[in-house]
Image: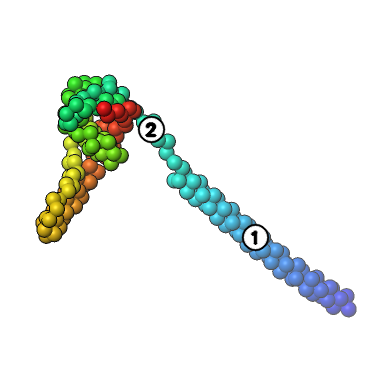
Amino acid sequence: MAKAAAKAKTAEADVGAAPKQGKGKLFLIIGLVVLLAGGGGGAWFFLQAKKGDDETAEVKPRPKAAPMFEKLEPFVVNLADRGRYLQVAMELKVSDAKVSEQIKKVLPEIRNGILLVLSGKRAEEVASADGKLRLQLEIRHAANKALGIDFDLPPVMKAFPEGTEQAVIDQARAEFDKLSEAAKASIAKVDGMGVTDVLFTSFVIQ
C-alpha cells in the first residue's frame, strides 16, 4: 500500500509539473516575439527618421552669392540723329570678383565699345522699353567682347515696304526665326559668365 501511494503521489507531481513547464516555454516564446517586434519597430523608426533627415537636407536651399556690380562713369554721346544726344549712367552686373578685376584692366576698351554702340543709335530706337532692352543686350555684348567672351546678337526684324510679295516676307521671317534661335543658343552658352546684365541708373535723351 505504501509503495502504491508513493507512485500515485509521484505521478501527480509529474502531471502538475508538465503544465508549468509548458507555460514557461510559452512565456519565453512570447517574450522573444515582443522583443523582436520592438527591435524591428525601433529599427524602422530609426530608418524613417534618418530618411526624413536626408530629405530635409536635400531640399535645404543653398545660400546665393551676393550680386556684384561695377559702376561706370556716365556717358554723354551724340546720337545718329542730328542735334540729338544721350546722357546715360549704368552699372555692369558681374559674375564674381575676378571679373571685376578684369574689367578694371580693360576698362578703356569696354568704354570704347559702349560709346560705339550708343553713338550708332537714333533717338527713336532707344526711347521705347523694347529699345532700351535691346540696347542693354548690345552693351553687354560689347563689354563681354572686351573680356574675351563673345555671343551672337539676335537679328532685328525690319519693316517691309508696302507692296512686298508675301513669299519674300515669309522667307525673311523664316530666316529671322532661324537666326533668333541660333542667337538664343549662343547667349545660353555664356550665361553666368563675365558681365551678366546691364542696369541703367540714368537715361536722358535730348
Could you say which is closer to the camera, residue 171 or residue 72?
171
Could you say which is closer to the camera, residue 164 or residue 168?
164
User: Which kind of residue does numbered mark 1 sit on?
Assistant: Val
Q: Is residue 114 visible?
A: no
Quarter that holds the N terminus: bottom right
- Please determine whether, in this image, residue 177 is positioned above or below residue 90: below
- Please determine whether, in this image, residue 132 is positioned above or below residue 4: above
> Which image quadrant for residue 44?
bottom right
Residue appearing at x 65%, y 60% in the figure = 34
Residue appearing at x 23%, y 37% in the figure = 124
User: Label 2: which residue?
Assistant: 65
Question: Taking 63 as reference, is 81 left or right?
Answer: left
**Residue 108: % across, % down:** 19, 21
Tell which tag, 2 or 1, sits nearer the viewer.
Answer: 2
Q: How many marks?
A: 2
Label 1 neighbour load within 10 Å: few <14, some 14-19, many 20+: few
Element type where label 2 sits in the image: loop
User: Which kind of residue does numbered mark 2 sit on?
Assistant: Ala
Marking on residue 66: none
**Residue 205: % across, % down:** 27, 29
Label 2 neighbour load within 10 Å: few <14, some 14-19, many 20+: few
Separation of residues labelled 2 and 1 (CA atoms): 54 Å
User: Label 1: which residue?
Assistant: 34
Element type where label 1 sits in the image: helix
**Residue 38: % across, % down:** 62, 56
Residue appearing at x 12%, y 56% in the figure = 163
Could you say which is closer to the camera, residue 65 or residue 19?
65
